């Protein structure tokens, strides 16, 4: 991979455990990585045991309440959306936690990204979204046609159907034609904390007469780009949201484009 594209992977792989963090165990399984500051906060909860280099959550059901208490102290922004907590991607659900607390606890999250493709006589095109200016994370950055985190009790496919409707007004009958193509994972330090994400990546071929419409206010606008323009933007700039670059590089590789 050339340096122009490799830099996006390097930027998304900046965490090598423990990196000064303490392991969080839930039901005897490694579930997250905590900073010293968060560990100090947790010492005050009876459902948490701190021994040497390990933090043990004695009552998994207490985690949502602990996270809410820490958000009330200003540790992170409460999002009002629960995510499942697992030690491994396909393992059992150990607990749930508010989405805003995931980076602070270093807990792995799952997301979905959708490449919206249009095959025209003049070549392959890609729908590109611009994130709303009031987004807390990466406002104004370029994004996929639809993307989102997988909430508690849902899976990636259900999230695709939901986010496609909410973010781009794609009807379920059309969104259900999407095909899963890849999974992308990374662990990186961000201003909000440690991001450990797994992204399920889908392609959706859309008819030429379809135009996405933002329905939930998270997207400012949509543009249909030749795929070569997206390739150049990833290669030459940081215009796309950080993890979108990884999903697009996977697309470019599958299309046979040199990266």
Image (cartoon, helix red, strand yellow):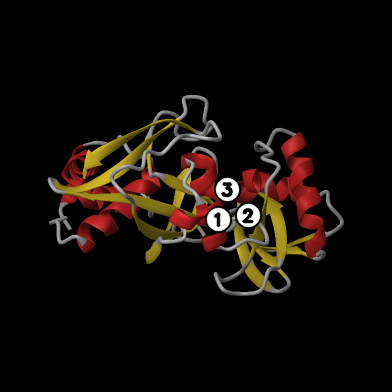
Left or right for 165, reference 38? left
The answer to whether one can see residue 10 in this image is: no
Q: Residue at x 51, y 54 (%)?
A: 172
105 or 166: nearer the viewer: 166
Name the N-terminal-most of marks 3 and 2: 3
Task: Estimate the x, y position of residue 138 in percent, counting from the top left.
Answer: 44, 34
Residue 100: give its label: none
195 or 235: nearer the viewer: 235
Q: Residue at x 57, y 73 (%)?
A: 90
Residue hosting label 2: 151
Residue 103: give its label: 3
Label 3 close to label 2 by CB (< 8 Å): no
Density class for disc 3 (Cα within 10 Å; few <14, some 14-19, many ≥20) is many
Label 2 close to label 1 by CB (< 8 Å): yes
- Comparing marks 3 and 1, which lies closer to the viewer? 1
Task: Estimate the x, y position of residue 95 in percent, counting from the top left.
Answer: 73, 63
Q: Residue at x 50, y 40 (%)?
A: 167
Name the N-terminal-most of marks 2 and 1: 2
State how many labels appear: 3
249 or 19: nearer the viewer: 249
- Comparing marks 2 and 1, which lies closer to the viewer? 1
Q: Alpha-carbon distance for marks 3 and 2?
A: 15 Å
Task: Estimate the x, y position of residue 142 in percent, counting from the top left.
Answer: 36, 36
Residue hosting label 1: 159
């Amino acid at each position: 991979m050339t340096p122009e594209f490799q830099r996006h992977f390097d930027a998304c792989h900046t965490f090598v455990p423990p990196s000064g963090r303490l392991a969080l165990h839930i039901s005897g399984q490694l579930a997250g990585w905590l900073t010293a500051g968060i560990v100090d906060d947790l010492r005050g909860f009876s459902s948490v045991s701190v021994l040497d280099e390990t933090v043990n959550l004695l009552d998994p059901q207490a985690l949502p309440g602990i996270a809410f208490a820490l958000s009330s102290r200003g540790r992170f922004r409460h999002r009002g959306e629960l995510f499942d907590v697992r030690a491994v991607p396909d393992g059992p659900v150990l607990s749930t936690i508010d989405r805003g607390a995931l980076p602070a606890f270093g807990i792995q999250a799952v997301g979905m990204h959708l490449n919206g493709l249009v095959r025209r006589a003049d070549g392959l095109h890609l729908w590109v979204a611009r994130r709303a200016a009031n987004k807390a994370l990466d406002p104004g950055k370029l994004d996929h046609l639809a993307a989102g985190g997988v909430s508690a009790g849902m899976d990636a496919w259900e999230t695709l159907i939901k986010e496609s409707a909410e973010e781009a007004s794609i009807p379920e009958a059309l969104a259900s034609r999407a095909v899963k193509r890849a999974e992308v994972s990374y662990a990186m330090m961000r201003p909000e904390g440690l991001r450990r994400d797994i992204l399920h990546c889908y392609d959706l071929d859309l008819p030429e007469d379809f135009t996405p419409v933002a329905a939930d206010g998270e997207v400012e606008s949509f543009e249909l780009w030749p795929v070569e323009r997206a390739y150049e933007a990833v290669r030459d700039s940081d215009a796309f949201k950080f993890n979108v670059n990884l999903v697009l590089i996977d697309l470019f590789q599958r299309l046979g484009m040199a990266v």
